[in-house]
């Protein structure tokens, strides 16, 4: 964390000072402390308890979604670790890198690969992922409790074989 008023970086349990001469850069261009987010990976160098330079080794960009109407209220998965509820034409910060993005709602959905570049906006048109729809998948539930009842969206399902469900939440 950074306390700009007091000129202090806290890294783990240790506090370090910095001054107006702090050299902060990313990909060869100067940055400000306000450009940093918790998604960035930093290399910090200094002498004893004073920080002299900060290098952004892995930065972030933004992912903006267009044509979200069909997927509003469902979820987007970016890579393995990022999940977010989709809102109308939303934008989100994402660490730089290449990701598989997947969306699904009411049997519509798909996935694609995107690249998020440091300091840049990547635009994803969700109309390109809706597919032919609605799509279905089969789930085999392993239920070993005698007399158990399986309900999906309030509807009782026979789980003695595969259960066909529309893609979505």
Image (cartoon, rainbow, N blue to C red):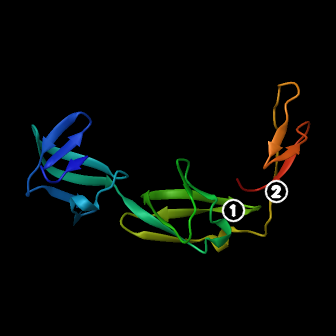
Q: Can you identify the residue that label 2 sits on?
A: 136
Residue 65 sits in quarter: bottom right
Answer with left or right where residue 107 lies relative to residue 81: right
Residue 105 sits in quarter: bottom right
Secondary-structure class at tag 1: strand
Residue 12 sits in quarter: top left
Which numbered marker is on residue 74? none
The correct choice, above or below, for 116 with respect to 77 in the image is below
Q: Residue at x 87, y 43 (%)?
A: 156
Answer with left or right where residue 92 lies relative to residue 125: left
Where is residue 144 drawn, in percent x and y? 83, 25
Where is residue 132 drawn, in percent x and y? 78, 70
Q: Can you identify the residue that label 1 sits on?
A: 110
Secondary-structure class at tag 2: strand
Q: Residues within 10 Å of mark 2 (few under 14, many from 20)?
A: some
Answer with left or right where residue 149 lies relative to residue 126: right
Q: Residues within 10 Å of mark 1 (few under 14, many from 20)?
A: many
The reply to whether callout 2 and callout 1 are in contact (CB within 8 Å) is: no
Q: Residue at x 69, y 62 (%)?
A: 110
Where is residue 43 drawn, in percent x and y? 25, 47
Where is residue 97 drawn, in percent x and y? 45, 57
The correct choice, above or below, for 54 with respect to 130 in the image is above
Q: Residue at x 16, y 52 (%)?
A: 53
Query: Sequence-wise, which precedes: disc 2 or disc 1?
Result: 1
Q: Nearer the viewer, residue 22 or 134?
A: 134
């Amino acid at each position: 964390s950074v306390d700009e008023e007091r000129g202090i970086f806290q890294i783990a349990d240790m506090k370090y000072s910095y001054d107006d001469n702090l050299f902060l850069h990313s990909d060869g261009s100067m940055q400000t402390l306000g450009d940093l987010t918790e998604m960035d990976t930093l290399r910090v160098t200094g002498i004893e308890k004073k920080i002299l330079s900060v290098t952004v080794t892995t930065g972030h960009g933004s992912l903006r979604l267009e044509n979200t109407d069909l997927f509003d209220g469902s979820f987007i998965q970016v890579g393995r670790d990022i999940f977010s509820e989709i809102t109308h034409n939303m934008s989100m910060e994402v660490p730089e890198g290449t990701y598989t993005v997947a969306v699904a709602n009411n049997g519509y959905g798909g996935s694609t690969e995107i690249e998020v570049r440091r300091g840049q906006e990547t635009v994803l048109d969700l109309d390109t992922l809706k597919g032919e729809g609605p799509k279905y998948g089969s789930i085999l539930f392993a239920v070993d409790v005698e007399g158990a009842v399986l309900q999906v969206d309030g509807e009782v399902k026979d789980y003695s074989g595969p259960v066909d469900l529309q893609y979505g939440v």
